[in-house]
Image: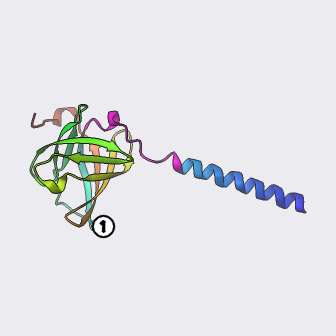
Amino acid sequence: MNKYFFALLVSAGFLLTGCRDEQQNTEPNTSKEQLTQRWELTTAERNGKKTETLRDAYFDLQADGSGVINLDGNAQNAQWDTEDNFLKISDTQSDFLSTDYAISNLQDSTMTLSVELRNIPFVMHFRIAEEEQVDSLQ
Protein backbone atom coordinates (compact mmCIF):
# COMPACT_ATOMS: atom_id res chain seq x y z
CA MET A 1 0.00 0.00 0.00
CA ASN A 2 2.84 2.40 0.84
CA LYS A 3 4.40 1.75 -2.61
CA TYR A 4 1.19 2.82 -4.35
CA PHE A 5 0.80 5.89 -2.15
CA PHE A 6 4.41 6.92 -2.85
CA ALA A 7 3.93 6.40 -6.63
CA LEU A 8 0.75 8.49 -6.53
CA LEU A 9 2.52 11.24 -4.59
CA VAL A 10 5.44 11.34 -7.06
CA SER A 11 3.06 11.40 -10.04
CA ALA A 12 1.11 14.31 -8.52
CA GLY A 13 4.39 16.17 -8.03
CA PHE A 14 5.32 15.78 -11.69
CA LEU A 15 1.85 16.85 -12.76
CA LEU A 16 1.97 20.01 -10.64
CA THR A 17 5.46 20.88 -11.86
CA GLY A 18 4.37 20.43 -15.50
CA CYS A 19 1.37 22.72 -15.03
CA ARG A 20 3.51 25.40 -13.41
CA ASP A 21 5.92 25.41 -16.38
CA GLU A 22 3.00 25.74 -18.82
CA GLN A 23 1.65 28.76 -16.94
CA GLN A 24 5.04 30.46 -17.07
CA ASN A 25 5.19 30.02 -20.85
CA THR A 26 1.91 31.92 -21.38
CA GLU A 27 3.38 35.24 -20.23
CA PRO A 28 3.39 37.85 -22.99
CA ASN A 29 6.45 38.20 -25.17
CA THR A 30 7.41 41.85 -25.00
CA SER A 31 9.98 41.94 -27.77
CA LYS A 32 10.35 45.36 -29.32
CA GLU A 33 10.19 43.77 -32.78
CA GLN A 34 6.71 42.36 -32.15
CA LEU A 35 5.41 45.67 -30.78
CA THR A 36 6.72 47.70 -33.73
CA GLN A 37 3.32 48.03 -35.40
CA ARG A 38 0.33 50.30 -35.54
CA TRP A 39 -2.11 48.98 -32.91
CA GLU A 40 -5.76 50.07 -33.16
CA LEU A 41 -8.23 49.79 -30.31
CA THR A 42 -10.98 47.20 -30.71
CA THR A 43 -12.63 47.43 -27.26
CA ALA A 44 -11.92 49.04 -23.90
CA GLU A 45 -13.13 48.88 -20.31
CA ARG A 46 -13.12 51.78 -17.87
CA ASN A 47 -13.57 50.81 -14.21
CA GLY A 48 -14.51 47.31 -15.42
CA LYS A 49 -17.29 48.52 -17.74
CA LYS A 50 -17.21 48.75 -21.54
CA THR A 51 -16.48 52.29 -22.70
CA GLU A 52 -16.54 54.19 -25.99
CA THR A 53 -14.35 57.00 -24.57
CA LEU A 54 -11.26 55.64 -26.33
CA ARG A 55 -13.09 54.70 -29.53
CA ASP A 56 -10.40 55.84 -32.05
CA ALA A 57 -7.35 55.12 -29.90
CA TYR A 58 -4.14 53.75 -31.36
CA PHE A 59 -0.42 53.28 -30.75
CA ASP A 60 1.78 53.63 -33.84
CA LEU A 61 5.14 52.30 -32.61
CA GLN A 62 8.27 52.64 -34.78
CA ALA A 63 11.43 50.50 -34.59
CA ASP A 64 13.59 53.47 -33.55
CA GLY A 65 11.59 53.97 -30.33
CA SER A 66 9.53 56.87 -31.62
CA GLY A 67 5.80 56.70 -32.14
CA VAL A 68 2.46 58.42 -32.32
CA ILE A 69 -0.25 57.67 -29.78
CA ASN A 70 -3.84 58.76 -29.58
CA LEU A 71 -5.85 57.89 -26.48
CA ASP A 72 -7.60 61.19 -25.84
CA GLY A 73 -8.60 62.26 -29.37
CA ASN A 74 -5.31 64.12 -29.81
CA ALA A 75 -2.53 62.35 -31.75
CA GLN A 76 0.80 62.94 -30.03
CA ASN A 77 4.42 62.14 -30.76
CA ALA A 78 6.00 59.94 -28.11
CA GLN A 79 8.97 57.76 -27.26
CA TRP A 80 8.51 54.12 -26.28
CA ASP A 81 10.35 51.09 -24.95
CA THR A 82 9.58 47.78 -23.24
CA GLU A 83 10.63 46.43 -19.88
CA ASP A 84 9.31 43.49 -17.83
CA ASN A 85 5.99 43.12 -19.71
CA PHE A 86 5.40 46.88 -19.75
CA LEU A 87 5.05 49.24 -22.69
CA LYS A 88 6.76 52.39 -21.42
CA ILE A 89 5.51 55.59 -23.10
CA SER A 90 7.35 58.88 -22.52
CA ASP A 91 7.75 62.41 -23.88
CA THR A 92 4.09 62.99 -24.80
CA GLN A 93 2.41 66.42 -24.80
CA SER A 94 -0.15 65.17 -22.27
CA ASP A 95 1.88 64.13 -19.22
CA PHE A 96 -0.77 61.66 -18.01
CA LEU A 97 -0.24 59.55 -21.16
CA SER A 98 3.51 59.21 -20.41
CA THR A 99 3.29 56.14 -18.20
CA ASP A 100 3.81 52.39 -18.08
CA TYR A 101 1.13 50.24 -19.73
CA ALA A 102 1.04 46.64 -18.47
CA ILE A 103 0.99 44.12 -21.33
CA SER A 104 -1.34 41.40 -20.10
CA ASN A 105 -1.73 39.61 -23.44
CA LEU A 106 0.35 39.71 -26.60
CA GLN A 107 -0.35 37.48 -29.60
CA ASP A 108 0.64 37.69 -33.27
CA SER A 109 -2.00 40.29 -34.10
CA THR A 110 -3.63 41.28 -30.78
CA MET A 111 -2.51 42.97 -27.59
CA THR A 112 -4.18 43.82 -24.28
CA LEU A 113 -2.91 46.71 -22.14
CA SER A 114 -3.89 47.71 -18.62
CA VAL A 115 -3.22 51.16 -17.22
CA GLU A 116 -4.46 53.65 -14.67
CA LEU A 117 -4.98 57.12 -16.17
CA ARG A 118 -5.98 59.95 -13.85
CA ASN A 119 -6.77 57.37 -11.12
CA ILE A 120 -9.15 55.46 -13.43
CA PRO A 121 -8.29 51.86 -14.41
CA PHE A 122 -8.51 50.99 -18.10
CA VAL A 123 -8.14 47.71 -19.98
CA MET A 124 -7.62 48.19 -23.70
CA HIS A 125 -7.73 45.53 -26.44
CA PHE A 126 -5.85 46.27 -29.68
CA ARG A 127 -5.28 44.62 -33.03
CA ILE A 128 -2.65 45.30 -35.67
CA ALA A 129 -3.94 47.82 -38.22
CA GLU A 130 -4.49 46.83 -41.80
CA GLU A 131 -1.91 48.34 -44.18
CA GLU A 132 -4.24 50.72 -46.06
CA GLN A 133 -5.52 52.29 -42.80
CA VAL A 134 -2.07 53.30 -41.53
CA ASP A 135 -1.25 57.01 -41.37
CA SER A 136 0.81 58.92 -38.81
CA LEU A 137 1.92 62.44 -37.94
CA GLN A 138 5.40 61.90 -39.35
Bounds of the magenta span?
24-38
- What's the colour scheme? rainbow
Q: Is residue 51 left or right of residue 5?
A: left
Could you classify mark 1 by the number of other residues whose Cα lies within 10 Å: few (under 14), some (14-19), or many (20 or more)?
few
| Residue at the image position 23 percent from the left and 47 percent from the top | 89
- For label 1, the SS is loop
**What amino acid is at disc 1?**
Gly
Q: Position of residue 8 (x, y in %)?
A: 79, 58
Quarter of the image with the N terminus is: bottom right
Residue 127 coordinates in the image, percent (x, y): 28, 44
x and y, in percent, of residue 100 in the image: 28, 52
Establish if 105 lies above or below 61. Answer: below
> What percent of the width, then of the height, locates residue 46?
25, 64
Secondary structure mostly taken by the magenta-highlighted segment of the chain: loop
Is residue 5 part of the magenta span, yes or no?
Answer: no
Q: Residue furthest right?
A: 1
Q: On the image, which quarter does residue 43 sit in?
A: bottom left
Quadrant where the image shows the C terminus = top left
Q: How many marks?
A: 1
Residue drawn at x 89%, y 62% is 2
Q: Residue at x 39, y 42 (%)?
A: 107
Could you tell whether 125 is left or right of 26 in the image? left
Q: Which residue is mark 1?
A: 48
Viewer-closest of 42 and 48: 48
